[in-house]
Image (spheres, rainbow, N blue to C red):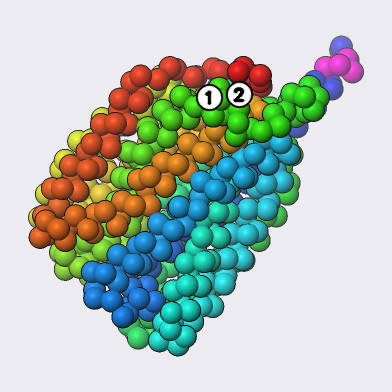
């Protein structure tokens, strides 16, 4: 019987370690990001339902809802700054350390939100503190999202990048399910007065424990092979100013990816934030039913994200994205007419399809963005494009939708026109892009 050579044993050990780190990376990125998105999603739900009364009661109902949704957008507005700063640090110092820092900041800010006094207790100080914490939360998430994506994708083998990307795509809908389930359970168990008094605070306070779990998991993951390969080339291989590299050599790519993701970002927040307000306030759907509908839609979104990532490994990123974009355009046109039928079953089906195909594209986004930039500017370029799209259309979409609905006396067709145009823009950006599947992530200095 032949004895394996030392080189074979060493190679096998390295391979086993690589696979272990890949599994830990995707687990840490998925679980940690889902926990962070839980806090972010929780804020989106209460901003559309509870916060107008608690933090902006001096305004009329429409204005208080707009102000509350504007505080939600403030967090998204802070994301590009977090993306730029964390992106540059991540391209200089590595992905792992930034991930640990951002999840810690996110946890502290969310915990403090659960302790905030209301407008009735401290006046204008209450919304001021709320918006301030929201900005800190958004700053942390701006760097966190891309860092987690790169940790998983850069650890993955070339044949499984899409699948790992799809696993990351489940983070947001999973957090929406957790947030809506928590609020659904609390609103069912507590009286309306108790829920508005202290019930909404419980998930914010409890989420801090979950964030600690995310930190523990991420501490078990090593730095990515792509960044380690860049470090081995010496200090000169790492860009002193990654943001400058993106703007000078890769601005077309960053702009195209930003414009592409404007569509999915707008549609996502239209469904998970504005739709709850529209269903409960305009169509008379009970709040508990609204929470339940969003939970079912997000289950479909999980399936969509996994399907998108998996399919992109089979037929390529571009073709898979074109399929998803076309399907969301169809859903956009039929969404509000079906909601107005006042059928729970039909509403559940159209919300599930709409969010499912939207997240189908989000499941491909991490790997497509990562494959579009060289290692020394990948964190910065990807974070800037991702956060920029959320700033331009994601955060403002619920505010724009409320304003358009009010301006057109309850007719949703102006909203459909805006969302359809953004969806069409996304489709064009995908169609004019190159295929990135099988691109080597260890490349650098391509500028």
Q: Tell me which corner region of the image, top left, top right, bottom left or bottom right, holds residue 440.
A: top right
Q: Secondary structure at mark 1?
A: loop
Q: Are marks 1 and 2 in contact (CB under 8 Å)?
A: yes
Looking at this view, is 220 or 283 the one in front?
Answer: 283
Looking at the image, can residue 137 be seen? yes
Q: Secondary structure at mark 2?
A: loop
Q: Give residue 328's mark.
A: none
> Where 308 falls versus 179 (above or below)?
above
Residue at image location 24% in from the left, 54% down from the top: 401
Determine the main secondary structure of the stretch shown in magenta: helix
> Where 238 falls versus 333 (above or below)?
above
Q: How many marks?
A: 2
Residue at image location 35% in from the left, 62% down from the top: 69
For the residues marked 1 and 2, what is the alpha-carbon distance in whole angstroms? 9 Å
Residue 325, image x, y percentages: 30, 31
Residue 407, image x, y percentages: 14, 58
Q: Residue furthest top?
A: 2
Which portion, as a residue range, is magenta? 4-8
Q: Tell me which corner region of the image, top left, top right, bottom left or bottom right, holds residue 307.
A: top left
Q: Name the residue tied to disc 1.
A: 250
Sequence order check, earlier mark of 1 and 2: 1
Q: Residues within 10 Å of mark 1 (few under 14, many from 20)?
A: some
Looking at this view, is 262 or 158 the one in front?
Answer: 262
Q: Name the residue tied to disc 2.
A: 374
Residue 276, image x, y percentages: 28, 61
Q: Would residue 210 appear left or right of 221 to someone viewing this image?
A: left
Pick the quarter of the image with the N terminus: top right
Q: Is residue 372 magenta?
A: no
């Amino acid at each position: 019987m032949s004895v394996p050579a030392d080189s074979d044993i060493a190679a096998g050990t390295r391979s086993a370690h690589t696979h272990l780190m890949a599994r830990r990376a995707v687990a840490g990125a998925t679980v940690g990001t889902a926990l962070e998105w839980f806090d972010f999603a929780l804020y989106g739900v209460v901003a559309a339902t509870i916060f107008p009364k608690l933090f902006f009661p001096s305004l009329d109902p429409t204005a208080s809802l707009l102000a509350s949704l504007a505080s939600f957008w403030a967090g998204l507005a802070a994301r590009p700054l977090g993306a730029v700063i964390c992106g540059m640090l991540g391209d200089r110092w590595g992905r792992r350390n930034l991930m640990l820092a951002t999840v810690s900041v996110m946890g502290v800010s969310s915990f403090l939100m659960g302790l905030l006094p209301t407008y009735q207790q401290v006046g204008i100080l209450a919304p001021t503190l709320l918006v301030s914490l929201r900005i800190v939360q958004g700053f942390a998430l701006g760097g966190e999202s891309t860092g987690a994506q790169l940790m998983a994708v850069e650890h993955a083998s070339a044949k499984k990048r899409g699948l790992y990307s799809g696993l990351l795509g489940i983070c947001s809908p999973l957090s929406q399910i957790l947030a809506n389930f928590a609020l659904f359970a609390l609103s069912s168990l507590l009286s309306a007065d108790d829920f508005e008094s202290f019930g909404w605070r419980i998930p914010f306070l409890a989420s801090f424990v979950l964030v600690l779990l995310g930190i523990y998991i991420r501490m078990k993951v090593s730095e990515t092979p792509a960044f380690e390969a860049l470090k081995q080339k010496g200090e000169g291989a790492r860009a002193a100013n990654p943001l400058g590299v993106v703007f000078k050599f890769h601005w077309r790519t960053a702009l195209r990816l930003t414009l592409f993701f404007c569509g999915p970002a707008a549609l996502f927040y239209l469904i998970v934030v504005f739709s709850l307000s529209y269903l409960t306030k305009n169509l008379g759907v009970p709040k508990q039913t609204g929470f339940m509908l969003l939970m079912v839609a997000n289950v479909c979104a999980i399936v969509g994200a996994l399907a998108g990532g998996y399919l992109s490994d089979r037929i390529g990123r571009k073709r898979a994205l074109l399929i998803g974009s076309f399907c969301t355009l169809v859903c956009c046109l039929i969404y509000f007419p079906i909601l107005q039928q006042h059928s729970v079953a039909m509403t559940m089906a159209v919300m599930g399809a709409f969010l499912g195909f939207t997240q189908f594209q989000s499941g491909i986004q991490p790997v497509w963005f990562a494959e579009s930039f060289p290692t020394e500017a990948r964190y910065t370029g990807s974070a800037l494009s991702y956060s920029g799209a959320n700033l331009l259309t994601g955060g403002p979409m619920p505010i724009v939708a409320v304003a358009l609905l009010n301006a057109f006396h309850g007719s949703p067709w102006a909203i459909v026109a805006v969302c359809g145009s953004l969806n069409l823009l996304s489709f064009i950006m995908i169609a004019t892009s190159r295929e990135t599947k099988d691109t080597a992530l260890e490349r650098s200095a391509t500028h």
